[in-house]
Image (tube, grey):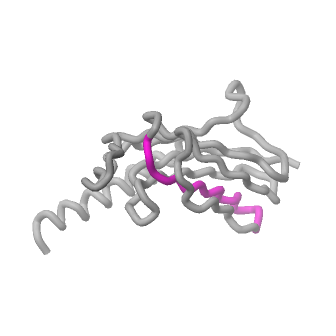
Amino acid sequence: MGLSSCYAGLMRRLLVSALLVASSVGIFTIPAAADPASSSTTTTIPSKVTLSFDYSDNSSPASASNGRFNIIVDVLPEHTPGVVKIVAVAPDSANVDNLTCNFQAVQQSQVECAFNFTASGVWSIRALYSVTPKDDVSAFARTNLRVAN
């Protein structure tokens, strides 16, 4: 195993460790370098991408009632091409499956998914950014959403 592959493996383990430690903090965003666009396209991809959650009322913690609820992820800087996948991780006690909104193209610096929450409790909402669905995730954000009857 070459020195560069050992270094890459160590960096991946450090990134995973940092994500696990940071996941206990409400919203967490990791700006990371995105892969450069291929030379055949004129679109440029910024070196750092930041994700944030957007709710209609940012003055109080995010909450929803059981049923349909839209979650919006802002992708910054503006006009960043790429895709975002949003996953709603169900509370452990809910005994229901996680909800997934598969990779969607960023439109006007946002991605929106409608989830139908079927169980009360605190759901962990995770947004994953990638240049394309086949590339590695290069930015991550997490927040909690309280769902009540």
In the rendered image, residue 77, in percent from the top left (x then y), is placed at 43, 34
Q: Left of 55 or right of it: where is 81?
A: left
Q: Residue furthest left?
A: 3
**Which residue: 81% across, 53% down?**
120
In the rendered image, residue 15, in percent from the top left (x then y), is placed at 35, 53
Q: Left of 116 or right of it: where is 138?
A: left
In the rendered image, residue 72, in percent from the top left (x then y), is placed at 64, 42
Q: Does the stretch in magenta take in 76?
A: no
**Which residue: 76% across, 68% down?**
95
Q: Is residue 45 above or below residue 103?
A: above
* Quarter occupied by residue 103: bottom right
Q: Is residue 60 above or below residue 4?
A: above
**Which residue: 31% across, 59% down?**
12
Q: Is residue 58 above or below residue 6?
A: above
Q: Quadrant of the N terminus?
A: bottom left
Which one is nearer the viewer's eye here, 105 or 74?
A: 105
**Which residue: 25% across, 53% down?**
39
Q: Magenta span covers which residues?
A: 80-95
Q: Residue furthest bottom?
A: 1
Q: Does the stretch in magenta take in 83?
A: yes
Which one is nearer the viewer's eye here, 124 or 81?
A: 81
Q: Left of 116 or right of it: where is 17?
A: left
In the rendered image, residue 82, in percent from the top left (x then y), is placed at 45, 51
* Quarter occupied by residue 61: top right
